């Protein structure tokens, strides 16, 4: 398929987003940028959040893990163990965190930490969000940009750094004015394209192989591609680790994440925001299951075409296409051009929600929580806007640098990296919020809070590297996030005092 033709579709798609942005950002203010004037429709938010949560990682990386015995550590439908854990985490967000955020009428969720513990805890929480979201968003962006680079831009002679800069420029252009007000609509549009692409690819491959979903599942089961629960307690993917890990990942990466909660608190009232979370939960479970089914189907398709699979490699025409390379390789080289175009549109639909919301949320957090522009008396709307634009541009440059670092590292399955990073960076947020909600103790002013939040991840890193030696072969998986949160909680308890 012509890379120029695919690139034309990418540009056309971007122009569509730009049109939506222009329409939704008319008469936009700083209030529109930060929280959408608290007037977002909960159904649009719920639907758009699917695209933000799934991103290109789910679209490309999750199907590739189905037959992978190494790398991210999954096999078969093992990732669904984590998804089942999400259900409990999202329920906690809906019925514990959302009421707190609405009661306090927060613009930034980290204002809760200020009201509960003071300025140092507040700034620490905001800084850890900035670190967490920057790492996670750029890892997701790298995955999709790398696919576009390998399958389109390399053939046009465009260097990776130019591709990255162009994508970031596109995102900047359509989020520049409207912020959350625009993103609620663009995410809804992008989620639609992504899910339509998923369904079309599923239906086409099933039709080509003359299989029903039932018969395809039976064949996958015979080949060991549908294994769900892992009962090896020493394994990173042991089912209880993944269930518990999934719950705390959902709480930390959604409920304690300004990007995700920024959209939720833009809904006009608490009950609609709770409806948003629970609707989003049900849809997320179904969509992840479909992506895993697609992954099994892709392996069956390649085996039917003569690929050789030994559990570690899927060799086809001399190339190993296991992991993140599987879906793009099949869609762009082994399916009709029309399906390839649909795949590219769906892929970039998965790309933009993982970046536009992150840029907006990081800009909001830095402006509101670190610089405090909303609190400075005499700072005009125009001056606030000037600061916001500068911060927005600065984060785009930071994104560029981080993506280049991921390019240097590279990995066949980026989802493992993202979840490992989350274990280290979101753990202190989990400990801070948990300590605030579950105790009535106070923290003295000073930077001991920040020190605790830095020490806990360092201890977790040492523990992770030595767990197998210290604990008779036990490997730490997604429970790292919980361990990190607990260490932070204990550290905060040690420096706290009883409420007077």
Image (cartoon, rainbow, N blue to C red):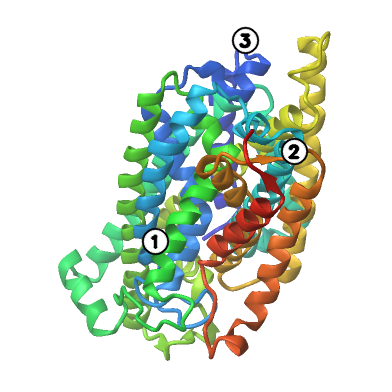
Q: Are marks 2 and 3 in contact (CB under 8 Å)?
A: no
Q: Residue at x 50, y 77 (%)?
A: 321
Against 454, residue 361 (above or below) is above
Structural crowding at the residue carrying mark 1, measured as other residues with C-alpha within 10 Å and reported as few (<14), some (14–19) or many (≥20): few
Of badges 1 and 3, nearer the viewer stands 3
Asked whether residue 16 appears in the rendered view, the answer is: no
Q: Are marks 2 and 1 in contact (CB under 8 Å)?
A: no
**SS type, badge 2:** helix
Q: CA distance from mark 2 to mark 1?
A: 52 Å
**The C terminus, quarter of image:** top right
Asked if 310 appears above or below 198 in the picture, the reply is below
* Residue bearing mark 2: 123
**Of callouts 2 and 3, which one flags the residue occurring earlier in the amino acid sequence?**
3
Label 1 vs 3, first from the N-terminus: 3
In the drawing, what numbered circle is on residue 363? none
Which marked residue is nearer to the observer: mark 2 or mark 1? 2
Which residue appears at 66% of the width and 80% of the height?
465
Mark 1 element type: loop
Relative to 235, 158 lies left or right: right
Give the quadrant of residue 417. bottom right
Q: Residue 285 location, x and y as percent?
A: 33, 53
Q: Is mark 1 in CB contact (under 8 Å) with mark 3?
A: no
Question: Looking at the image, is mark 2 or mark 1 earlier in the sequence?
Answer: 2
Q: Which residue is mark 1?
A: 336
In the rendered structure, find residue 27 and report the number of the disc placed on it. Answer: 3
Q: Percent x, y for residue 257?
A: 57, 42
Q: Nearer the viewer, residue 375 or 220?
A: 375
Mark 2 is surrounded, within 10 Å at the Cα level, by few (under 14), some (14 to 19) or many (20 or more) other residues, namely many
- Would residue 20 be found to the left or right of residue 238 on screen? right
| Residue 31 placement: quadrant | top right
Horizontal arrangement in the rendering, residue 188 relative to residue 470 (left or right): left
Q: How many numbered marks are there?
A: 3
């Amino acid at each position: 398929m012509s890379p120029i033709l695919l690139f034309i579709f990418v540009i056309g798609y971007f122009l569509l987003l730009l049109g939506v942005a222009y329409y939704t950002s008319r008469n936009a203010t700083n209030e529109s940028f930060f929280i959408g004037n608290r007037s977002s429709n909960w159904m649009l938010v719920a639907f758009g959040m699917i695209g933000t949560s799934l991103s290109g990682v789910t679209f490309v990386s999750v199907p590739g893990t189905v037959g992978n015995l190494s790398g991210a550590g999954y096999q078969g439908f093992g990732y669904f163990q984590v998804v089942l854990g999400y259900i409990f985490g999202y329920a906690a967000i809906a019925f514990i965190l959302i009421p707190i955020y609405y009661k306090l009428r927060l613009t930034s969720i980290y204002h809760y930490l200020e009201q509960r513990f003071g300025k140092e805890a507040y700034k620490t929480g905001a800084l850890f969000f900035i670190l967490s979201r920057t790492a996670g968003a750029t890892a997701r962006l790298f995955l999709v940009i790398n696919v576009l680079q390998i399958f389109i831009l390399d053939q046009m002679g465009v260097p990776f750094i130019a591709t990255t800069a162009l994508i970031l420029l596109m995102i900047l252009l359509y989020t520049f004015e409207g912020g959350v007000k625009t993103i609620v609509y663009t995410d809804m549009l992008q989620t639609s394209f992504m899910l339509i692409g998923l369904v079309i690819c599923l239906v086409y491959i099933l039709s080509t192989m003359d299989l029903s979903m039932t018969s395809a599942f039976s064949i996958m089961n015979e080949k060991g591609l549908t294994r769900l629960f892992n009962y090896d307690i020493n394994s990173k993917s042991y089912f209880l680790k993944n269930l518990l890990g999934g719950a705390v990942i959902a709480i930390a990466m959604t409920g304690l994440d300004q990007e995700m909660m920024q959209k939720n608190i833009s809904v006009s009232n608490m009950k609609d925001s709770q409806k948003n979370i629970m609707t989003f939960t049900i849809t997320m479970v179904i969509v992840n299951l479909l992506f895993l089914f697609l992954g099994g189907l892709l392996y069956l398709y390649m085996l039917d075409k003569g690929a050789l699979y030994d559990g570690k490699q899927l060799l086809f025409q001399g190339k190993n296409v296991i992991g993140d390379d599987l879906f793009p390789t099949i869609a762009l080289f082994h399916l009709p051009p029309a399906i390839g175009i649909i795949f590219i549109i769906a892929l970039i639909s998965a790309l933009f929600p993982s970046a536009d919301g992150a840029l907006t949320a990081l800009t909001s957090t830095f402006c509101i929580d670190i610089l405090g522009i909303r609190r400075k008396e005499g700072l005009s709307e125009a001056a606030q806007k000037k600061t916001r634009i500068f911060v927005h541009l600065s984060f785009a440059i930071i994104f560029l640098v981080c993506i280049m670092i991921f390019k240097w590292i590279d990995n066949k399955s980026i989802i493992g990296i993202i979840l490992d990073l989350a274990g280290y960076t979101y753990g202190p947020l989990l400990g801070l919020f948990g300590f605030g909600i579950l105790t009535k103790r106070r923290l003295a002013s000073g930077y001991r809070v920040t020190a605790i939040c830095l020490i806990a991840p360092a201890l977790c890193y040492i523990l992770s590297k030595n767990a197998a030696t210290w604990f008779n072969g036990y490997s730490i998986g997604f429970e790292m996030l919980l361990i990190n949160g607990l260490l932070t909680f204990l550290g905060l308890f040690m420096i706290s005092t009883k409420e007077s």
